[in-house]
Image: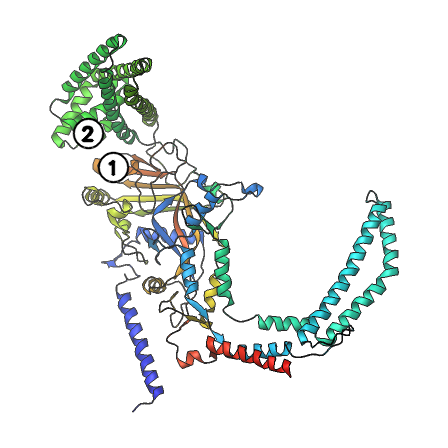
C-alpha cells in the first residue's frame, strides 16, 4: 500500500497534467502566430495587427504586466464634458468628476481587441476582490507581540515625588516621564517666542540697523537664560531614558503595529472615504488624468476645406431635406385653407398656380418612374440653380439616381430626361417654395390677429421647421458650390500637423491585409477582417455592402492608407491600491473564486497565453486600465487602380452620413461638432474613397495585469498551508490568556 506522501505526490502530478492538457486544448483553438504561406509567397500581415503594432510602438511601453487593448469602435469625446479651470487650481465640478469616473473606471475583457467594455466597473470589482480576502494570523508573530505586551504591562515601581502610593506599569512610567519632558521643552519654546515678540515690537523690521539691535539684544537675553532651561529639559530626558528610551518605544510600536492584512481594511476604508454619492443613488470615484490639460487636446487640426464632403455626398444629404420641405409646404397649404381671410385668397391662388406648374413640370420629367424618382427630382431641382443653365454635374445626378432603386434601364433613361429638362422644373419648384413661404408668413399673422389658438398651435411648428430646413438647404447649397470648385481628389491621408503631446501614425498597405484576421487575442464577437470590419461591425446581412466591398477592393489592386495623431493619457486613482494583491500569499480567500490567475511557473511577459489565461480563468479582477489612447485627425483612404463602383461609394457615404464607424474608428459626432449629425466626412471620386474623422476619440486602453492571487481557500487549507499560522479563535484565546495572567499579577 502506498503511504500518504506517495498518494499526495501522485495527486499533484495528476493535477498538473490535467491543467497542462486543458491549457493545450485551449491553445489549439488559437490561430498560429506565424502567417500562413500561399505557395512561396508570405501572406501580408493583417490590417488589425499592423495598426495595433504601430500604435504600440509609437506610444511605447514594454511593461511585462501591461498590454494594449484596442476597442471597436472608438468612443467619441467632447472637450466641454471634461473642461475645468485647472490653471487657477479651481476644483472639478461634480459633473466633470462623474464624466471622468465613467471614462476611466470601465473594465474590458482580457483581449488585445474588444468590441466594448464588459459592463463591469473597476471600483466595484476592486471592492469585491478586497472582500474576498482575509489575513492569515502568523502564530510566531502573534506570540512575540504578546511577549512585548507583557513587557509593557509589567509592574514597575517608581517614585514621582508626589507621595502617592500607587502601582505603575512600565509603559505608564515611561509616558508620564515622557510627557513631563515634552511639557518642559514646550515651556522653554513659549518663553523664547514671547521674548522674540517683545523685542520685535521694540525693534520693528524696518531697516538693517533696527534688525541688528533686535538680534544683539535677543542673543544677550538667550545667553543669560538658556542654560537653566536647557538643564531642566536634559534632566527630564535623563529620567525618561533611565526607564526606557523613546527609540526603544518606537521599535516596540513598529513591531506591534506590523503584520500583513491591515492593508485590506485600510484599502476598504480609503475606498469608502473617497466615494461620492450621486443623485441617482450611485457613487462617483474621482480620478486624475495626466497631462492635466488633456481635454484641451480634444480638438481637430482639420480645416473646413479638409472636411468638405464631395458634391455627391452633399447632394444625398440634400435629398432628404428637399423631400421634407415639399411635405411641409403641402401641410401649410392645407392648414391655410381653413383660415377664412380675404387677404390670404390671392396668396392661396398663387400657391395653387405654382403647385400646378410644378406638378406639370415634374410629370413631364418623371412620366412612369414612380415615387422613387420623385425624391430624386426634388433634390436635383434644389441643386440646379447653383449651376449655369441648371446643368447639374453628371456624377451628382448619377449618384442620386443610383439610390432610387429603379433598375439599370430606367435609371439611364431618367438620367437622360433630368439632364435635358431641368431648367423649367427647377424654376417651377423655386416659385412654389417661395409662394408657400409667403403663404405661411401671412397665415401666421392672420391666426394671431383672429386669436385662432388651435390653428396657431398647428401652424407655428410647421413654419418654424420649414424655416430651419430652408436654412439647412441653403447651407448645403453653398457647400455644394464650394465643393464643385475645389479639387480635393488628391487628399493626403497624413494629418495636417502633429499637436504637442501627440505622435503621428501613417500606414500604407494593400487591400489583401483587410482579408487577414488578426493573430492577436481578441473577443470572440469582434470581426477584424472583411466588410464587417471595414464598416466597424455594420450588419450587412440584408444589404449588398459585403459583396460590393469584396468586389471593389479585390477586382483591382487597392491601396489602403491611414493616418492619425495618437496620445497616451495616464489615469491616477488615489483610492486604488493594487499592491494589496501582491500580498495575497499571506491571506486566505473566503470564496472558491480567484481574483486573478496564479500560474506555475509565473508569467514573465505579456504573452498571448497569459491573455488567454486572464480571459478564461473566470477571475474576478484579472486586469484594469492604467491609461487611455486618444486619436484625432484621423484619415482613411482607399485608392483603386481601377474605378470604384457607385454602389460601394454610395454605401460608404450613406454609412458615414448617419455617423457610422469604419475600421477601429467611431463616426459619432461629439456635442461640439459643427452642427453635424456625423463626425466622419466622406469624399468619393472615380478611384478613391476618403474618410476624415473630426471627432477625437478613445481607441483603446493600456491594461495592467492584477498581481497573481496566491491566497489559500479558507475551507480547503492543507497542513502545509496552515503551518506557522493560527486560527482567529486561537489568536483570541492566546490574547485573553495573556490578559488574565496580567490581572493575576496585579492582584498579588
| Alpha carbons under labels 2 and 1: distance apart | 14 Å
Which residue is at a point 34% across and 79% down the rendered structure image?
A: 12
- Quadrant where the N terminus sits is bottom left
Is the residue under label 1 in contact with that under label 2 (CB below 8 Å)?
Answer: no
Give the side of residue 139 with respect to residue 538, left or right.
Answer: right
Percent position (x, y) of residue 495?
41, 40
Q: Which residue is mark 2?
A: 401
Between 504 and 379, the residue placed more toward the observer is 379
Percent position (x, y) of residue 66?
42, 59
On screen, 255 above or below 9? above
Q: Which residue is mark 1?
A: 649
The kind of secondary structure element at disc 1 is: helix
CA neighbours of label 1 inside 10 A, class few (<14), some (14 to 19), many (20+): many
Which residue is at a point 19% across and 41% down the rendered structure image?
A: 544
The mark nearer the N terminus, 2 or 1, is 2
Corner quadrant of residue 308 = top left
Residue 498 visible? The answer is no
Corner quadrant of residue 315 = top left
Percent position (x, y) of residue 126?
42, 59
Percent position (x, y) of residue 163?
77, 74
CA neighbours of label 2 inside 10 A, class few (<14), some (14 to 19), many (20+): many
Which residue is at a point 51% across and 70% down the rendered structure image?
A: 260
Q: How many marks?
A: 2
On screen, 490 above or below 272? above
Question: Which residue is situated farthest in the bottom direction here?
Answer: 1
On screen, 374 above or below 605? above
- Quadrant where the C terminus sits is bottom right
Give the side of residue 439 with respect to residue 276, left or right.
Answer: left
Corner quadrant of residue 181 = bottom right
Between 563 and 710, the residue placed more toward the observer is 710
Residue 47 visible? The answer is yes
The kind of secondary structure element at disc 2 is: helix
Amino acid at each position: 500500500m502506498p503511504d500518504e506522501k506517495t498518494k499526495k505526490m501522485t495527486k499533484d502530478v495528476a493535477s498538473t497534467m490535467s491543467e497542462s492538457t486543458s491549457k493545450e486544448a485551449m491553445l489549439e483553438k488559437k490561430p498560429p502566430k506565424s502567417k500562413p504561406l500561399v505557395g512561396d509567397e508570405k501572406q501580408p500581415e493583417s490590417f488589425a495587427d499592423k495598426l495595433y503594432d504601430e500604435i504600440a510602438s509609437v506610444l511605447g511601453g514594454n511593461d511585462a504586466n501591461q498590454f494594449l487593448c484596442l476597442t471597436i469602435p472608438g468612443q467619441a469625446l467632447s472637450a466641454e464634458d471634461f473642461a475645468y479651470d485647472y490653471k487657477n487650481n479651481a476644483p472639478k465640478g461634480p459633473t466633470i468628476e462623474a464624466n471622468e469616473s465613467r471614462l476611466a473606471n470601465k473594465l474590458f475583457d482580457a483581449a488585445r481587441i474588444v468590441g466594448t467594455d464588459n459592463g463591469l466597473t473597476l471600483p466595484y470589482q476592486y471592492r469585491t476582490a478586497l472582500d474576498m480576502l482575509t489575513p492569515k494570523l502568523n502564530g510566531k508573530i502573534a506570540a512575540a507581540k504578546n511577549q512585548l505586551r507583557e513587557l509593557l504591562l509589567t509592574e514597575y515601581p517608581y517614585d514621582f515625588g508626589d507621595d502617592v502610593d500607587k502601582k505603575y506599569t512600565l509603559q505608564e512610567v515611561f509616558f508620564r516621564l515622557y510627557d513631563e519632558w515634552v511639557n518642559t521643552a514646550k515651556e522653554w519654546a513659549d518663553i523664547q517666542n514671547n521674548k522674540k515678540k517683545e523685542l520685535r515690537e521694540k525693534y520693528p523690521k524696518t531697516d538693517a540697523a533696527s534688525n541688528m539691535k533686535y538680534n544683539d539684544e535677543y542673543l544677550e537675553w538667550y545667553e543669560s537664560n538658556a542654560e537653566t532651561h536647557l538643564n531642566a529639559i536634559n534632566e527630564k530626558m535623563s529620567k525618561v531614558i533611565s526607564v526606557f528610551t523613546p527609540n526603544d518605544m518606537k521599535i516596540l510600536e513598529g513591531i506591534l503595529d506590523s503584520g500583513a492584512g491591515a492593508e485590506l481594511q485600510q484599502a476598504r476604508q480609503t475606498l469608502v472615504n473617497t466615494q461620492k454619492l450621486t443623485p441617482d443613488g450611485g457613487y462617483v470615484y474621482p480620478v486624475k488624468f495626466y497631462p492635466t490639460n488633456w481635454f484641451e487636446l480634444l480638438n481637430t487640426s482639420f480645416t473646413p476645406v479638409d472636411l468638405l464632403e464631395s458634391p455627391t455626398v452633399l447632394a444625398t444629404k440634400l435629398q432628404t431635406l428637399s423631400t421634407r420641405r415639399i411635405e411641409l409646404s403641402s401641410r401649410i397649404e392645407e392648414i391655410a385653407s381653413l383660415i377664412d381671410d380675404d387677404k390670404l385668397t390671392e396668396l392661396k391662388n398663387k400657391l395653387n398656380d405654382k403647385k400646378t406648374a410644378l406638378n406639370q413640370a415634374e410629370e413631364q420629367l418623371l412620366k412612369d418612374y414612380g415615387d422613387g424618382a420623385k425624391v430624386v427630382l426634388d433634390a436635383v431641382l434644389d441643386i440646379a440653380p447653383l449651376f449655369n443653365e441648371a446643368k447639374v454635374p453628371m456624377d451628382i445626378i448619377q449618384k442620386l439616381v443610383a439610390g432610387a432603386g429603379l433598375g439599370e434601364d430606367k435609371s439611364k433613361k431618367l438620367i437622360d430626361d433630368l439632364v435635358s429638362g431641368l431648367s423649367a422644373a427647377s424654376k417651377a419648384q423655386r416659385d412654389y417654395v417661395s409662394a408657400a413661404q409667403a403663404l405661411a408668413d401671412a397665415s401666421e399673422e392672420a391666426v394671431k390677429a383672429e386669436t385662432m389658438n388651435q390653428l396657431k398651435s398647428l401652424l407655428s411648428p410647421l413654419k418654424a421647421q420649414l424655416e430651419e430646413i430652408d436654412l439647412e438647404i441653403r447651407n448645403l447649397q453653398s457647400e455644394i458650390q464650394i465643393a464643385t470648385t475645389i479639387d480635393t481628389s488628391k487628399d493626403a491621408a497624413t494629418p495636417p500637423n502633429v499637436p504637442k503631446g501627440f505622435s503621428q501614425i501613417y500606414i500604407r498597405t494593400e487591400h489583401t491585409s483587410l482579408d487577414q484576421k488578426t493573430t492577436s487575442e481578441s473577443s470572440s464577437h469582434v470581426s477584424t477582417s472583411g466588410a464587417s470590419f471595414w464598416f466597424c461591425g455594420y450588419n450587412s446581412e440584408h444589404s449588398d455592402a459585403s459583396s460590393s466591398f469584396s468586389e471593389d477592393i479585390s477586382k483591382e489592386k487597392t491601396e489602403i492608407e491611414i493616418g492619425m495623431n495618437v496620445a497616451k493619457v495616464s489615469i491616477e486613482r488615489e483610492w486604488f491600491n493594487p499592491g494589496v494583491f501582491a500580498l495575497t500569499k499571506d491571506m486566505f480567500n473566503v470564496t472558491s473564486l480567484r481574483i486573478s490567475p496564479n500560474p506555475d511557473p509565473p508569467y514573465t511577459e505579456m504573452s498571448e497565453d497569459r491573455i488567454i489565461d486572464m480571459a478564461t480563468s473566470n477571475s474576478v479582477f484579472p486586469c484594469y486600465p492604467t491609461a487611455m489612447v486618444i486619436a484625432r485627425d484621423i484619415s482613411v483612404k482607399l485608392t483603386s487602380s481601377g474605378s470604384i463602383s457607385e454602389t460601394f461609394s454610395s454605401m460608404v457615404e450613406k454609412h458615414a452620413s448617419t455617423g457610422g464607424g469604419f475600421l477601429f474608428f467611431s463616426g459619432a459626432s461629439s456635442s461640439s461638432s459643427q452642427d453635424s449629425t456625423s463626425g466622419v466626412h466622406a469624399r468619393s471620386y472615380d478611384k478613391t474613397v476618403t474618410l476624415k474623422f473630426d471627432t477625437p476619440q478613445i481607441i483603446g486602453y493600456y491594461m495592467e495585469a492584477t498581481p497573481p492571487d496566491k491566497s489559500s481557500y479558507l475551507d480547503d487549507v492543507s497542513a502545509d498551508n496552515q503551518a506557522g499560522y493560527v486560527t482567529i479563535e486561537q489568536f483570541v484565546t492566546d490574547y485573553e490568556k495573556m490578559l488574565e495572567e496580567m490581572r493575576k499579577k496585579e492582584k498579588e
